[in-house]
Image: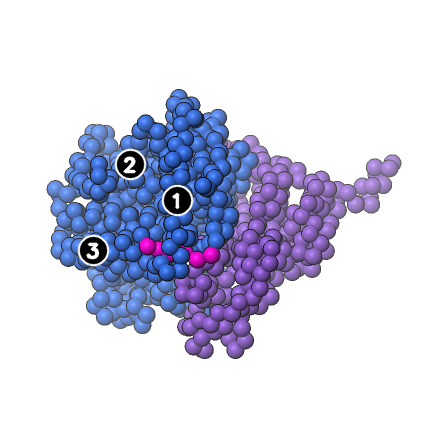
C-alpha cells in the first residue's frame, strides 16, 4: 500500500510562477504557514518567457495615462466580456505592484530622469509597459523568487499534484507525488491557491513548455469549481516558424513596439488593409504616422501592427492562406528597416531586444539587425480558467482560490500584451491575502484525511506501470491530441470541425485509459506525461465545447460559420462545470451589470 | 546534413550507470534537445531529463555535450560532428538523480546564505527611487542569469574539490555581485564574501565565463570586482599600517 508523507500548512499554493510566488509571499506576510508545490525547479516557470513588459499606468512616459485609460483599454481588448471588477482592480493596483517589485530588487529600464521606463504595446493607448529589455519575465520571477525564499515558505519542487482534497464541501488540501523519487505526498491546508498557468500543450504549435497541461483547471473542475471563458485561447501573432524544431517559440510584441513592421511576400504592409471599427480612431492611416508613434510622438496614432493580438494573428493567417506568405509559411517581421530612420539602429536593436537578437542568431542563423524574421501565430495564452470572485479570487468552492493565467475574468475574450505580468502580481497578491484570511477563519479538521480516497488516487496514478510496455505510448497520445486541437479548434473554427475534435478527444481518452509505462517511479518522464494526459484531455474538451456553444466571432474566437460579432452573445460568459454524473455541462451565464461609474469611464474613453 | 545521428546517452542513477546508443533521424535546424525528445518519444519513454522553455531562457536542460557543459536547447546539431556519436552526460558536479537529471538543490540552499537585498529609503515622497540607466545596466548584466548552473558545473573548486560547504561558486558570486552593485542596496557582504563564501578559492581561470550561455562576463565583471572589495578591506597594506599605528 503506497505511503503518503504528510505536510500541514495554512495556505497551499500550487504553482511557482509569478502568481504563485506573489500569492505565497502575501500569504506569508499575513501570518500564514505557506507551502508551495511546483512541477519544475524554482524559478523555471513559464513567467521567465514573458518578454515585453508589465502593464501599469505609472504615467512615467506619458502623463495622460491613468487607471481609467488602462481599465478602458483592457475592457476594449477583452471585447467587454471581462470581469469588470477585476479589470478595475487590476488597473488601479498594477502601479503599486510594479513599485513593490522595485522595492524587492527588480531593475527596470529607466527614463532619462531616472524613473521606470515604459514602452508601447498592442491595444495600450499610451506607453505603459515597464520592462527590462525583452526579458521582463525573468526579472520578475527572479525578484519574487529571491525575495520569497527569505519570507519563510516551504517549496516542494518538482512535484505533481494528483488531486485536490475535499471534506464536506470544503477544501482541505491536495495530494500528489515528487518526481525525483515517485513518492506520494499529502499537503493538508485550510486554503489552496491554484496558480498553475495555462493549457498551451493542448496545441501543436505553442510557445508554452511541457508544464502547461491545464492541471489546475482540471483539478479544480473535478472537485466542482466552475470554469469560464474556455473558448478564448490566445494565438500570439508572432512565433518563430523556422527552423521546424523551434516553431512556436515566442517573438516578443516588443519588436513591433520598437518599430518593427509586418510585410507579406509582396513586401506590402498588409496590416493597413483591415482595421477594426473599434480601433479606427486610434490607428495610424499611414506608415510615417505609425513610425512617429513608436518614437514617442504624442500626436501620432499607433501603427496597425500594434492592434490587438487576435486581430494581428488572423491577418497573418489570411495572408498565408492567400498565398502571400514566406517560404516557411509565415510573414516577415522586419525591425532592421528602422536603420532608415535611426543612425545607430544596429546597437539600438541589440540593446532593446537582446534576447530576440540572441534567439534568432543562435537558433535560426539570422541577424535581426540586418534581415527580416519569419513569424506566424503560436498558441500562447489561455484567457479562460477558474471562475473567481473579483475581489478575493475565491472560486465557487470555499477555500479554493485561483490567480494568474489559471483564473478567468480579467482578460475577457482577448488579453492585451503586458496585462498578464500585472495580472500575476495584482491578483497573486489578492489571492494570497484572502487565502490567508480564509485559512485563519476556517480551520479544517485535520483528522479527517480520508485514507481510502488517498489509496484510490495512488492506485490510479500507478496504473500505467501495471499496464506496462504493451500499453499505449503517452507521448503519441499527446501528439495526437495536439494535432487534433491545432487542426480543428485553432485560429479559424467551424462547428463541423469542432464536432470532429470532440470525437477525436473521446477516442484519445479511451486510448489514454490504457496508457502503459516501463521502468520505475524515479524521475520517469514517461509516467509524468501519462499523468498529465487526463488534464490535457479534459481542458481540450472544455475548450471545444465552449467554442461550439459560442456561435459568434469575438476576440480570440473566430468562427468561420459565424463570422460576425453578435451583440446578444456579448451579454454572456460561458461556464463549464462538472455535472452530477460526471458529465461536462456547458452553459450561458449573463454578465453582471457594470456600475454606472465604470460605464462612464468606458464612454469617456471611446 | 546527415539523415541520422547516433546519440550516446548516459543512463543510470546514483548507484550505477552506463552509456546507451540511440540512432535517430535528424533534420536541418534541430538542436540536441529535439533529438533527445524524439528518442524519448520513440525509443526510451522513461529517459529522464529536465527542460522547460526550449529557448535558452529558463536554464533547465543543462548537460555535458561531448564533454562541454551546454544547454541542450541551444546546441544546434549543425555545430556538432554527426559522423561521431554525440555523447550526452549529466552535469558532473552534482549528484545524479537519474539519466541526465542531477540534484542541483545545493544551489538553492547556498543562495539562502547570501544576505538578501536591502534598499535605501525611497528617494521620492511617493515611495519610489530614481536611478540612471548606466548604473542599472551594470547590474542588469548579472540579472540575465538563468540559473542553469553550468558555471557551477565547470568550476574546479566545486567539480574537483567539492568545496560546497565553504564556497558558493560562480553563480552565487554573480548573485552577490548583483546585490553588492545594485544602486539601491545598503547591505554589506564583504566580510561574508571572504569568510563565509570563500571567494579566495576562485583563482580566475575564467572557465565559468566561457560556458555561460547568457555570455555574462562572470570573472571580469562580477568576481574580480568583489575580490577587489575584499582586498581593499582586509589586505590593503596602508590600511593595515594605519591599524597598527
2 vs 1, front mark: 1
A300 vs B116, nearest the viewer:
B116
3 vs 2, front mark: 3
The image shows residue A316, relative to residue A176, as above or below, that is below
What subunit carries mark 2?
Answer: A
Q: CA distance from mark 3 to mark 2?
A: 25 Å
Residue A488: percent from left, percent from top: 22, 58
Q: Colour of chain B?
A: purple
Q: Earlier in the sequence, mark 3 or mark 2?
A: 2
Q: Dividing the picture into quarters, in which one does residue A567 lie? A: top left
Magenta segment: A514-519
Which residue matches tag 3?
A503
Please tell me the numbered disc located at residue A459. 1
SS assignment at label 3: helix
The image shows residue B57, relative to residue A226, as above or below, that is below
- Magenta-span inclusion, residue A515: yes
The chief SS type of the magenta part is loop
Which residue matches tag 2?
A225
SS assignment at label 1: helix
Q: Earlier in the sequence, mark 2 or mark 1?
A: 2
B198 vs A596, nearest the viewer:
B198
Left or right of A563 in this view: A432? right
3 vs 1, front mark: 1
Q: Earlier in the sequence, mark 3 or mark 1?
A: 1
Whether tag 3 and tag 2 are in contact, CB under 8 A, the answer is no
A122 vs B227, nearest the viewer:
B227
Within-10-Å neighbours for mark 1: few <14, some 14–19, many 20+: some
Q: Colour of chain A?
A: blue
Amino acid at each position: 500500500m503506497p505511503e503518503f508523507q504528510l505536510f500541514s500548512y495554512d495556505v497551499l499554493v500550487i504553482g511557482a510562477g509569478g502568481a504563485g510566488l506573489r500569492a505565497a509571499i502575501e500569504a506569508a506576510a499575513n501570518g500564514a504557514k505557506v507551502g508551495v508545490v511546483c512541477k519544475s525547479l524554482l524559478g523555471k516557470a513559464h513567467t521567465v518567457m514573458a518578454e515585453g513588459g508589465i502593464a501599469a499606468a505609472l504615467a512615467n512616459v506619458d502623463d495622460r495615462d491613468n487607471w481609467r485609460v488602462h481599465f478602458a483599454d483592457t475592457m476594449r481588448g477583452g471585447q467587454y466580456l471581462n470581469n469588470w471588477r477585476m479589470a478595475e482592480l487590476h488597473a488601479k493596483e498594477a502601479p503599486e505592484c510594479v513599485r513593490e517589485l522595485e522595492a524587492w530588487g527588480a531593475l527596470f529600464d529607466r527614463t532619462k530622469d531616472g524613473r521606470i521606463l515604459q514602452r508601447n504595446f498592442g491595444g495600450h493607448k499610451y506607453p505603459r509597459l515597464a520592462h527590462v529589455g525583452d526579458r521582463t519575465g525573468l526579472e520578475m520571477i527572479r525578484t519574487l523568487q529571491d525575495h520569497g525564499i527569505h519570507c519563510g515558505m516551504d517549496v516542494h519542487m518538482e512535484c505533481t499534484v494528483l488531486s485536490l482534497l475535499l471534506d464536506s464541501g470544503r477544501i482541505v488540501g491536495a495530494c500528489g507525488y515528487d518526481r525525483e523519487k515517485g513518492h506520494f505526498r499529502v499537503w493538508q491546508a485550510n486554503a489552496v491557491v491554484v496558480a498553475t498557468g495555462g493549457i498551451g500543450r493542448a496545441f501543436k504549435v505553442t510557445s508554452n513548455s511541457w508544464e502547461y497541461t491545464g492541471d489546475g483547471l482540471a483539478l479544480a473542475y473535478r472537485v466542482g469549481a466552475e470554469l469560464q471563458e474556455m473558448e478564448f485561447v490566445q494565438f500570439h501573432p508572432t512565433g518563430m516558424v523556422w527552423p521546424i524544431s523551434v516553431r512556436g517559440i515566442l517573438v516578443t510584441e516588443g519588436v513591433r513596439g520598437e518599430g518593427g513592421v509586418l510585410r507579406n511576400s509582396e513586401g506590402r504592409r498588409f496590416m493597413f488593409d483591415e482595421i477594426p471599427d473599434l480601433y479606427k480612431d486610434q490607428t495610424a492611416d499611414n506608415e510615417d504616422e505609425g513610425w512617429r508613434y513608436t518614437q514617442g510622438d504624442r500626436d501620432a496614432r499607433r501603427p496597425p501592427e500594434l492592434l490587438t493580438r487576435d486581430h494581428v494573428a488572423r491577418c497573418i493567417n489570411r495572408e498565408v492562406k492567400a498565398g502571400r506568405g514566406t517560404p516557411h509559411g509565415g510573414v516577415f517581421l522586419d525591425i532592421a528597416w528602422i536603420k532608415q530612420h535611426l543612425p545607430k539602429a544596429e546597437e539600438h536593436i541589440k540593446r532593446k531586444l537582446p534576447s530576440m537578437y540572441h534567439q534568432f542568431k543562435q537558433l535560426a542563423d539570422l541577424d535581426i539587425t540586418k534581415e527580416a524574421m519569419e513569424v506566424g501565430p503560436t498558441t500562447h495564452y489561455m484567457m479562460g480558467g477558474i471562475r473567481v470572485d473579483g475581489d478575493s479570487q475565491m472560486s465557487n468552492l470555499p477555500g479554493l482560490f485561483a490567480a494568474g493565467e489559471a483564473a478567468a475574468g480579467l482578460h475577457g475574450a482577448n488579453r492585451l500584451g503586458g496585462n498578464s505580468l500585472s495580472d500575476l502580481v495584482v491578483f497573486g497578491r489578492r489571492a494570497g491575502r484572502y487565502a490567508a484570511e480564509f485559512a485563519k477563519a476556517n480551520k479544517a479538521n485535520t483528522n479527517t484525511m480520508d485514507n481510502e480516497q488517498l489509496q484510490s488516487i495512488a492506485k490510479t496514478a500507478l496504473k500505467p506501470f501495471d499496464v506496462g510496455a504493451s500499453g499505449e505510448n503517452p507521448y503519441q497520445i499527446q501528439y495526437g491530441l495536439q494535432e487534433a486541437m491545432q487542426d480543428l479548434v485553432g485560429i479559424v473554427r467551424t462547428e463541423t470541425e469542432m464536432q470532429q475534435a470532440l470525437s477525436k478527444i473521446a477516442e484519445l481518452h479511451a486510448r489514454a485509459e490504457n496508457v502503459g509505462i516501463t521502468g520505475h517511479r524515479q524521475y520517469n518522464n514517461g509516467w509524468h506525461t501519462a499523468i498529465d494526459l487526463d488534464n490535457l484531455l479534459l481542458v481540450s474538451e472544455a475548450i471545444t465545447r465552449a467554442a461550439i456553444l459560442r456561435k459568434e466571432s469575438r476576440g480570440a474566437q473566430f468562427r468561420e460559420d459565424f463570422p460576425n460579432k453578435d451583440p446578444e452573445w456579448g451579454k454572456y460568459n460561458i461556464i463549464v462545470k462538472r455535472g452530477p454524473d460526471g458529465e461536462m455541462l456547458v452553459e450561458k451565464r449573463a454578465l453582471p451589470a457594470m456600475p454606472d461609474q465604470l460605464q462612464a469611464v468606458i464612454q469617456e474613453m471611446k | 546534413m546527415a539523415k541520422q545521428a547516433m546519440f550516446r546517452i548516459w543512463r543510470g542513477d546514483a548507484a550505477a550507470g552506463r552509456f546507451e546508443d540511440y540512432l535517430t533521424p535528424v533534420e536541418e535546424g534541430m538542436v540536441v534537445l529535439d533529438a533527445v525528445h524524439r528518442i524519448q518519444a520513440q525509443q526510451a519513454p522513461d529517459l529522464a531529463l529536465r527542460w522547460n522553455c526550449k529557448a535558452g531562457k529558463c536554464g533547465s536542460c543543462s548537460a555535458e555535450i561531448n564533454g562541454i557543459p551546454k544547454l541542450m536547447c541551444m546546441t544546434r546539431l549543425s555545430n556538432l560532428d554527426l559522423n561521431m556519436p554525440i555523447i550526452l552526460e549529466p552535469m558532473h558536479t552534482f549528484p545524479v538523480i537519474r539519466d541526465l537529471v542531477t540534484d542541483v538543490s545545493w544551489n538553492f540552499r547556498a543562495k539562502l546564505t547570501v544576505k538578501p537585498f536591502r534598499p535605501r529609503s525611497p528617494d521620492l515622497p511617493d515611495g519610489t527611487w530614481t536611478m540612471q540607466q548606466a548604473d542599472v545596466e551594470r547590474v542588469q548584466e548579472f540579472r540575465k542569469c538563468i540559473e542553469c548552473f553550468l558555471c557551477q558545473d565547470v568550476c574546479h573548486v566545486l567539480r574537483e574539490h567539492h568545496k560546497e560547504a565553504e564556497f558558493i561558486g560562480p553563480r552565487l558570486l554573480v548573485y552577490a555581485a548583483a546585490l553588492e552593485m545594485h544602486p539601491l542596496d545598503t547591505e554589506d557582504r564583504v566580510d561574508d564574501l571572504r569568510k563565509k563564501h570563500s571567494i579566495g578559492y576562485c583563482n580566475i581561470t575564467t572557465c565559468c565565463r566561457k560556458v555561460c550561455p547568457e555570455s555574462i562576463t562572470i570573472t571580469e565583471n562580477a568576481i574580480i570586482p568583489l575580490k577587489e572589495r575584499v582586498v581593499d578591506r582586509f589586505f590593503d597594506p596602508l590600511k593595515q599600517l594605519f591599524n597598527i599605528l
